[in-house]
Amino acid sequence: MNQINKLKIINDPIYGFITIPSELVFDLIEEPYFQRLRRITQMGLSNLVYPGANHTRFHHAIGCLHLMQKAVQVLLFKGVEISDEEEEALYVAILLHDIGHGPFSHAMEHSIVEGVSHEWISLQFMHELNQKFNGKLSLAIQLFQKNHDKKFLWQLLASQLDIDRLDYLKRDSFYTGVAEGNINSERIITMLNVVDNVLVVEEKGIYSIEKFLVARRLMYWQVYLHKTGLVAEQLLIKMLQRAKFLLAKGKNIQASESLLFFMKNSIDETNFSSSILEKFAQLDDYDVISAIKIWSTNEDFVLRNLCEMILNRRLLKIKLKNNPIKKQRIIDQRLRIQEAHKLSEEEASYFVFSGKTSNIAYQQDRQQILIYYKNGKIKDVSKASDQLNLRALSKPVIKHYICYPKSIN
């Protein structure tokens, strides 16, 4: 066999040419676990709102790898001590940070498996790969778990100003066409430094950080928590709940072998074995899309209509309110759908339901973004800013919603 060239260059629409920094990173990219991310959309069903939002977790992971290389180069240039082993561990950890995402990313998290986060599943994948690669991922796993003396290393992976956020805001802005999220990632990275083992931003970068925080808030309301995307994701979750319910009743529900397994079995952290991980690795968006197409002709009224709504973008109406939805309003709406389609109260609950969502751009009590001044002083960004009241961005905004068929006014 011909030897594979392990110094590949990837052409990315955001950053241009991205180089693969090492043979280990190349080999990890080639792994089926990682290649699966090509079949996991980055933004769930947001393409029902923004047609261009069809990029994948694979795109995002490669973009994060590129930005991490930039961050390491900047810090090394400024005299920060990062060993060759630590450098490669950062690349491995950021590459694999989202490898545990299930179909449609966040949309179906906790639906396929119960109460298990994608971060936890990512860690299980890392452990499996670490065995295959004879312990070469051990330091990356330490960083991923925030178990390292050099705090700034894992802050690059998981903090309020981490590489993950610097890529997904810019990338999602690009693919949705929502210009408000177009942050200057490379400018922010250029302003990074380390003081007393902690990641800081030099004072020249404060305006870029302000833009980053405002962009984050706007992208959440305009994109990630857009009401159409929100109701589509809820329909996806309820569709799976209904299919599981019918399976439990002994109904014949067709789907891929891997999807059927997770629908028939209750899986959580206590029974998530290596064999379960292998089954999870077979799951991607295509399993769910195929199931939706099959179930759209199912004899069950609820399942059939939920699938048709998603397939043909005939979604439920959704109204956002500042205050909780009154129970009587939900009861009244359900009664109307029950009478119109001769449904039980339980069946009507799939089409009329309420919930809440929240948005907080900056959490002052959680790994603060620190601004470093030339005189040696360090301030939290919300106190350092003289341009915008960033304290307002650190207050959660909660919206309550009700969803119901458009035939009901």
Image (cartoon, rainbow, N blue to C red):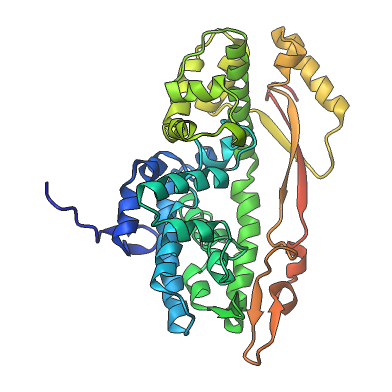
Image-based side of 367 in relation to 240, left or right: right
Q: Where in the figure is residue 376, as x and y percent of width and height?
A: 65, 89
Task: Determine whether 172 is above or below 201 in the image.
Answer: above
Image coords of residue 44 (percent x, y): 52, 40
User: Which residue: 48% across, 77% down?
Assistant: 190
| Residue 48 in the figure: left or right of residue 400 | left
Relative vertical location of residue 170 with respect to residue 100 in this rendering, above or below: below
Q: Give the position of the C terminus as an image quadrant.
A: top right
User: Viewer-proximal residue, 62 or 265?
Assistant: 265
Which of the 4 image quarters holds residue 233? top right
In-front residue for pair 46/406: 46
Towards the viewer: 341 or 35: 35
Query: Residue 362's quadrant in the figure?
Result: bottom right
Is residue 385 in sight in this rendering? no
Residue occupying the point 47% across, 79% down: 81
- Seen at 74% across and 15% down, the residue is 346
Rendering coords of residue 25 (x, y %) = 34, 57
